[in-house]
Image: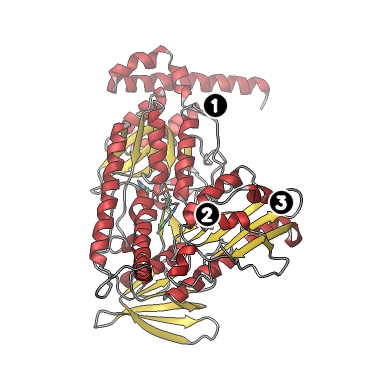
Amino acid sequence: MSYMSAASSTQGVRGQTRRQTRVLIRVVSFFFPMLSDQVTATPLTLLHRTHRPGSFHNNNMAALSRCRHRWKRNNCLHVLTRNLTGKYDYDLVVIGGGSGGLACSKEAAQLGQKVAVLDYVEPTAKGTKWGLGGTCVNVGCIPKKLMHQAALLGTAVKDAQKYGWQISGPICHDWASMADAVQNHVRSLNWGHRVQLQDKKVKYLNLRGSLLDEHTVRGLTKAGKETLLTAKNIVIATGGRPKYPTDIPGAMEHGMTSDDIFWMKTSPGKTLVVGASYVALECAGFLTGIGLDATVMVRSIALRGFDQQMAGLVTDYMEAYGTKFVKECVPKRVDKLSSGALQVTWTDTLTGSEHKDTYDSVLWAVGRAPETKALGLDKLGVQLKKESGKIIVGADESTSVPNIFAFGDIGEGRPELTPTAVKAGKLLARRLAGHGTELMNYDNVATTVFTPLEYGCVGLSEEEAEERHGKDGIEVYHAFYKPLEFSVAERDASQCYLKVVCELGGDQKILGLHFTGPNAGEVTQGFALGLQCGATYSHLLQTVGIHPTCAEELTKINITKRSGLDATVSGC
Ligand SMILES: Cc1cc2nc3c(=O)[nH]c(=O)nc-3n(C[C@H](O)[C@H](O)[C@H](O)COP(=O)(O)OP(=O)(O)OC[C@H]3O[C@@H](n4cnc5c(N)ncnc54)[C@H](O)[C@@H]3O)c2cc1C
């Protein structure tokens, strides 16, 4: 094609575009007279505002034909008008009212943005459902930590007798009382979140959201009633849900997950927990702690992704505490017996032999699946990681489609933790509102596993440090210590341990810090600041301890693994 003919064909398209534009304006003016002034003022400028250059004709014609069949049924024209005029219902629509979505929407509203947040909880296979706030509030961190506390109190009551408390009669635990108290607290948090949204002028919609285009969200009520919302930016923070195995007969029919256990009104009784993630170990840990018979079935390793020496200490302590472990085994089927008990058949992967036992409950903790399926992302071209199903995101939480962002548990490669979701959500809101450019720093995020012996860590595991710096590139300082409070209570402290992984050369920058013992979360949180500031081994030694605490042992740590010397702390 010659230059001339290309130019004349461009003019032809422009003429056609102008005619089509006039038709569109007439349609818009007919339905929305109040907008017609604005539309007719500078039609092309306004129309182009929401469309990429050069794509106006194709995009609008395609959009028109896509909408035609739904034209009568819903408010497609409303959406089209909004998109064409550059006037959206909202500056920001957030899908998912969990840790991240709530933080993001509240922050944006505080910065003057018009915001709506959609949150919808699909009941579990057992019918459990809950209120606003997402996983952490309803079926994660909060009820978990409270039930962990219930278990710790059981141990404390036993210790108390050694400290002179006279406790008459047998000590027993009542699940219903604990569950009632925990569930009431969670309900108060649900209510608190609703009030906060209202106070901050965030529109809360109890709708299941999906995307129609990069500016339009479709919300569905439980009854299937549809609402369309347009927004300049859309944020996806839909988190994940526990998975059930698909190849084990009876798994879903007779089993439950962490989405159910915290809402049970009656005790789960003798429980088999399948899986060895932190969720599995934490659940088995508090069940053991409140006096239930709990067994963990482990296929390969416990606490994958965590430092494996520390993982070993956590599970060793749990075994000594009373949790049973069935190692290198995989479940084969779950059958409900006439007595109501659940018979689990499993295979030993080493010997191939088959075993059976009966339980009152089977809890699957075999991983979590991202909540992406119902979002309609494939139609929009939002790219997902094939293996995980999570949304591929950039450092600024952007997805492969402009105006659509994702973060929290749904984001590929993001830590599945509440504080990271909250912080990332706030920073994203600030950037979208034009109030900052700061990106989320996902390095050196501290975390704690709330098992009977808590395990806190920040930075690299020993394995990761070795992989990055080589075995000869790191120095590992360690100590076995005895918490003072264990001494009078005559508790075994064999697994109370500290480990600081440093670079070998120079100032010995701290790469990772690991701690098992009481209040590990509190201890680790403090040291996380140090790592964020680039702390070195000599900074650690310059730090004066608080006596008598467990954390102070970290400021005295001086035995290297390399030396082979006994790392047991002696003396006061
Ligand atoms: C048992 C357990 C214990 C945990 N303990 C801790 C802990 O101690 N510390 C910690 O930091 N983290 C913990 N976590 C992890 C933490 O809960 C998550 O990392 C965090 O909740 C992620 O936040 P989010 O905003 O990404 O997603 P979520 O909190 O999962 O929120 C997503 C919300 O979106 C809703 N939703 C999904 N799809 C749609 C849709 N289409 N339309 C509308 N709404 C939708 C969901 O129902 C949910 O309410 C725990 C998790 C579990 C399961």
The label shown at residue 508 is 3
Tell me the CA gap for discs 3 and 1: 56 Å
Q: Where is residue 426 drawn, in percent x and y?
A: 45, 37
Residue 315 at least partly seen: yes
| Marked residue nearer the N-terminal end (3 or 1) | 1
Q: Earlier in the sequence, mark 2 or mark 3?
A: 3
Amino acid type, mark 2: His
The colour scheme is: secondary structure
Q: Nearer the viewer, mark 3 or mark 1?
A: 3
- Image-based side of 306 in relation to 326, left or right: right
Amino acid type of the residue tagged 1 in the rendering: Gly
Q: Secondary structure at mark 2?
A: loop
Q: Which residue is mark 1?
A: 54
Tell me which residue sits at (73%, 62%) in the image. 471
Estimate the x, y position of residue 180 in percent, counting from the top left: 23, 59
Q: Which mark is residue 547?
A: 2
Q: Is residue 460 left or right of residue 324?
A: right
Question: Looking at the picture, does residue 267 appear above or below residue 15?
Answer: below
